[in-house]
Image (tube, grey):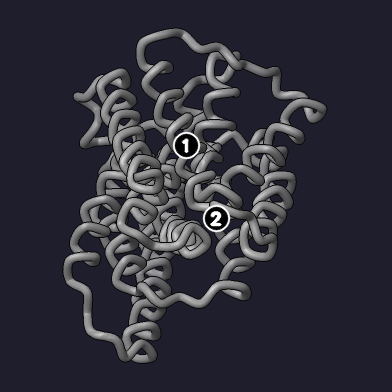
């Protein structure tokens, strides 16, 4: 893809993000929460840095932060998916630009992943689940522990890229992501790594398909959830925009073990704090 086309597509994402934030700023009359905005900005940048280099963990990092800040689980999941449209769009375009996309795998992941994401979003928004915040925090706790374990041991969940395997995997990854605020990368990327395809092709393809998974979840949730904490949404989007195009370059000197350990500990600590506060 030429640089000109890449810049045009990236510019469209910037315009969409700016329009969205302007709309919520004009319609929301509550005072600006600068504390929430700057923390979301920081976590949005960190999450985009991690996701761009590993192909996973943006959603679980962002959701863990929002839940830890006190935002309701349904809104936390909605905000993360809306923000991740722009972040995954940016990283996906970069992977496309440098040729890290496998078209065949992309097509296998796309439709099943979208179906799973919509189902997950509908369930979290419409089904009244008692103690939902704690349930998601426990899920995120296990995701954090999983990432730490993956950093220090060779966890093998590799699958052959046959339709009979990839389709259920994509549905599962999409559902977990749509319902829990994250999981597409950890479920799908981890499962496909180690096969015959180059790791950068797996990461690039899963990242590119993630844009459409997030779009499906976000559109579904926008019909069901009212956005009120627009500072959180603005911070996540802007923080992600600042870092996403350069994530791979920035993390080139960092080991995968270091990144996985950092994000795993971060998610684990935030989730434990949320669970601890619930029971005391």
Quadrant in the rendering for residue 83: bottom left
- Residue 70 higher or lower than 253, as above or below: below
Say left or right for 126 vs 45. Answer: right
Q: Secondary structure at mark 1?
A: loop
Eyeballing the image, is 167 above or below 258? below
- Quadrant location of residue 261? top left
Residue 5 visible in the current orientation? no
Which residue: 70% across, 23% down?
Answer: 161
Q: Which residue is mark 2?
A: 214
User: In percent of the image, x 73 and y 52: which residue is there?
Assistant: 115
- Left or right: residue 73 versus residue 94 is right
Q: Which residue shows up at 68% across the image and 38% down it?
A: 172
Residue located beneath label 1 in the image: 99
In the foreground, 58 or 136: 136
Question: Alpha carbon of mark 2 to alpha carbon of mark 1: how far?
Answer: 22 Å
Q: Position of residue 84 (x, y in %)?
A: 44, 56
Which residue is located at x 82 percent, y 27 percent? 164
Question: Quick check: 117 above or below 225?
Answer: above
Tell me the element at label 2: helix
The percent position of residue 68, horizontal first and vertical second, equals: 33, 51
């Amino acid at each position: 893809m030429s640089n000109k086309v890449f810049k045009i597509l990236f510019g469209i994402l910037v315009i969409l993000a700016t329009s969205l934030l302007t709309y919520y700023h004009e319609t929301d009359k509550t005072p600006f929460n600068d504390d929430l905005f700057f923390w979301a900005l920081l976590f949005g940048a960190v999450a985009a840095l991690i996701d761009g280099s590993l192909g996973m963990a943006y959603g679980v990092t962002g959701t863990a932060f929002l839940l830890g800040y006190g935002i309701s689980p349904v809104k936390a999941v909605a905000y993360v998916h809306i923000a991740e449209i722009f972040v995954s769009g940016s990283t996906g375009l970069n992977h496309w630009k440098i040729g890290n996309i496998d078209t065949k795998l992309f097509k296998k992941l796309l439709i099943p992943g979208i179906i799973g994401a919509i189902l997950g979003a509908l369930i979290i928004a419409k089904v009244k689940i008692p103690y939902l915040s704690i349930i998601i925090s426990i899920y995120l706790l296990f995701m954090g522990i999983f990432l730490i374990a993956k950093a220090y041991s060779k966890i093998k969940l590799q699958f052959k890229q046959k339709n009979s395997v990839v389709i259920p995997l994509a549905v599962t990854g999409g559902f977990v992501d749509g319902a829990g605020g994250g999981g597409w990368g950890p479920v799908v990327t981890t499962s496909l790594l180690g096969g015959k395809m180059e790791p950068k092709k797996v990461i690039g393809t899963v990242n590119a398909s993630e844009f459409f998974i997030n779009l499906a979840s976000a559109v579904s949730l926008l019909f069901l959830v009212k956005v009120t904490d627009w500072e959180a949404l603005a911070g996540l989007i802007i923080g992600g925009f600042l870092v996403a195009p350069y994530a791979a370059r920035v993390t080139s000197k960092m080991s995968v073990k270091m990144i996985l350990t950092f994000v795993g500990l971060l998610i684990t600590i935030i989730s434990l704090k949320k669970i601890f506060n619930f029971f005391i």
